Image: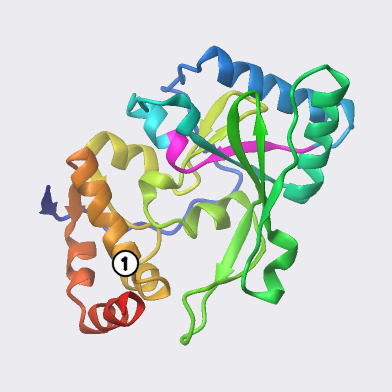
Amino acid sequence: MSFLAEPTLKKPAPPNEDVVVDVVELMLTEQEKRLFDLMKDVVRKNKLGTTLRVAGGWVRDKILNFKMEDSKAVDIDIALDNMLGCDFAILVNRWLEENGEEHHDFGVMHKNSEKSKHLETARVKVLGLSIDLVNLRTETYTEDSRIPTAKIGTPLEDALRRDLTINSLFYNINTGKIEDFTRVGYLHLQKRIIKTPLPPLTTLLDDPLRVLRAMRFANRFNFNVDEELYTAFCDPEVRWSLTIVRA
């Protein structure tokens, strides 16, 4: 792990610009192909018009060809653009039952903020894989809490709320394409850079534990920490906030 200078993230491009990363085609397992075909069939059968996107670490690890030793331990986070995760989980279980597949009761991961209860995550087991279903979201933090208030958001807003650009990529299940709404997530994977989508102090003061996550990913993948992010690690307010949340 080392530290390097990298240009500050430019203002996000207009929404009508292409965000598809055409140079990458993910290699899916047969289990993943079955899962995504099932999800698309649920959307078609119920005429939902939903765009399904896998978010976060699964996309990153697929691009890096980072293999999990145990496929059953892989969590796949699927973001929905027009319905609640729990409502979609009900439809998924109905599809499984109607098609003679094993189905399980789904759990709901509760949020502490009453204002965010409508965006609770539904966790369901499908074809042997653990799936988290939740809306695309934007998050707002207050000075006295590390627990954000979440609201339904756009793909861009959801990408920008992520801890690191390398974790902000989406795999669009409907199209089979990778989407990079920050315009730098895939580039940073290629250049092996750890950097935040928003200004580092904004990201770290929202949740100081992101300092530890950034360092963990830098060590895990042997990536370089962006110089501006490293400077933010050493910011007195960030260090004090991290001491408080770890106490």
Pinpoint residue 184: horizontal percent, then vertical percent: 37, 45
Q: Residue at x 45, y 56 (%)?
A: 162
| Residue 91 position in % (x across, y down) | 83, 36
Q: Is residue 184 visible?
A: no
Quarter of the image where one finds residue 98: top right
What residue would you read off at disc 1?
200
Looking at this rendering, what residue extends furthest in the left direction? 2
**Which sits in the foreground, 53 or 127?**
127
Q: Residue 58, percent across and down?
A: 46, 35
Going by the image, does 14 lie left or right of 135? left
Q: In the rendered image of this protein, does residue 100 appear above or below residue 17?
A: above
* Horizontal and vertical percent position of residue 147: 52, 73
51 inside magenta stretch? yes
* Residue 127 sits in quarter: top right
Residue ID at (73%, 48%): 85
Q: Residue at x 61, y 38 (%)?
A: 131
Q: Which residues are magenta?
A: 50-59
Above or below residue 32? Residue 81 is below
Q: Type of residue at label 1?
A: Pro
Secondary structure of residue under mark 1: helix
In this picture the colour scheme is: rainbow
